Amino acid sequence: MAIKQVIQFNSTNEYFKGFLQTIIKESEIKGSVSQKNNEITLLLDDKESSKLEKFSELSDKYLPHSIFLAEIKTTQEDIEIDPSDESSKPYNIGLCPKCLEILTDPASENYLNDDLKCTHYSNTAGYYSDTTFFTPHYTQGCAVLVADSSKIDELFIITDKEKEVLFSIEKPTIKVTIRDEELKAITSKNYINIKAPYNVRSTLAALNAKDSEISYLFFQNNHDLDIIKVQENTTIIRGSRVAKKPEELHEDNVLNRFLNISKEAQFNNSLGVNMSRKNGISFLHSSRISTQYVVKFQPFNLSQMLKNMKNNDTQKRLLENFGKKFPNIINQLDKNPNHDLFQSIAVILELDEKSFEALSDKSLEFRGNGGLKIDTFFKAEGFDYEAFFGSIMSFKLADTQAHYLAYSIFEAFGDMIISTFGQLKTKHKSDNFVMMGDMFENAILYSRILSKFQLSNPYFPKAFALDD
């Protein structure tokens, strides 16, 4: 008899299979491991209990967690095991538990060896250049390297599931709430991107900091693997490491990503939304016949929008009243005609930093349920920016708090997506919905889709990133 485990692994990356192969070899158990696309099959001989126990002990000690790890089904079957000798190509992933043990043990010949390379997933050693500079001094836009993991709950408000993601073998960057008052004061932030040591260089920097009783360091985030964890979903926002590279299925980058994610989901007829800061907001449709944009927001033009509002009697009066109460805001909008959509909203909400990230962070400060009704209408030319900004200005005039207004804006985007899909699904006879774009790094928007659209099974990519 054999113990059979079928492991759903939401990636075609081979390193998890490789770790299992190494543990099979080290435990000297009769076993095999194989991977076909997103499924890993592990077979172990259950006759020799001591070797099975050793496999279990080594797995507990050295098998890392992965962000791609999903359901595992275990059965006992009468199968003849053909021992495997699987290998894996090298990947730019973190140090495995065995490497960390070797690197930090003073008795090891590789103690503090800055040239250490992991070969514990049945791979040849790979080389990945990293010139990241780690410092105890904060500058605008820095992320945090967690130098002392034992202090993580003192520094941040972080769930157990987020810790699993943070310390996974892929070592992504995630955004968390700052708990430590000193860190809040240093950064002037309530939320910040954090990363666990992710290679030899960062691990040695973290060890040096910890020895000096420094719990964290700062570095400029290169966005090599940004991830959001919402409920049971683990989604790659953007990533140059471990995320699956889209096949060339279409010459348009947005439509190409949409087609790749639809293929991953096994959709033949799908609708999609792309909520992207870089590529704009659009709705997409793909069938066996064609792939196309079906709704596309026109580029935002602040000066033209203000001009349009001045040419509308109702919106003109709103602008005049707004200018009387907030002359500085109107002055900033007039002086910065090239501000993008989110910079312009940040000006109206009087945020210190004028960016999508600042608006997104502000929205997370609201802890209640249910936002304000922000207008997200469409007109002949596309999205009605004038009505959208008009409703934001109206609530600002009513002294609505910035965090509540920011929350309501992201909630409104979520409702707009759901409403638009409701209209498109009848026309295109599709009940398959794909989510794309880096705006989904906002947890309010992401959660709104999951809570209000869950019966329609919205699909967030598992192996692909949401955006370029």
Image (cartoon, rainbow, N blue to C red):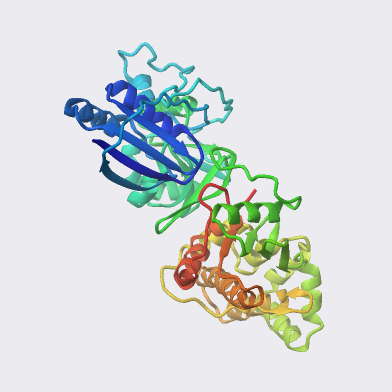
Q: Is residue 302 above or below residue 84?
A: below
Say which quarter of the image contains residue 375: bottom right
Closer-to-camera residue (40/47) = 47
In the displayed structure image, the side of residue 145 where residue 338 appears, left or right: right
Toward the top, the furthest residue is 109
Residue 197 visible to the viewer = no
Residue 389 in the image: above or below residue 114: below
Residue sitting nearer the eye, 22 or 289: 289
**Residue 343: image location, x then y, percent:** 67, 61
Q: Position of residue 19 (x, y in %)?
A: 39, 30
Q: Give coordinates of residue 293: x percent, y percent.
A: 72, 64
Could one spot residue 99 in this view of the protein? yes
Answer with left or right where residue 174 lies relative to residue 72: right
Residue drawn at the location 68% of the way across and 65% of the way down = 282
Is 248 placed left or right of 50 in the picture? right
Residue 25 location, quadrant: top left
Q: Residue at x 54, y 42 (%)?
A: 225
Q: Quadrant of the N terminus?
A: top left
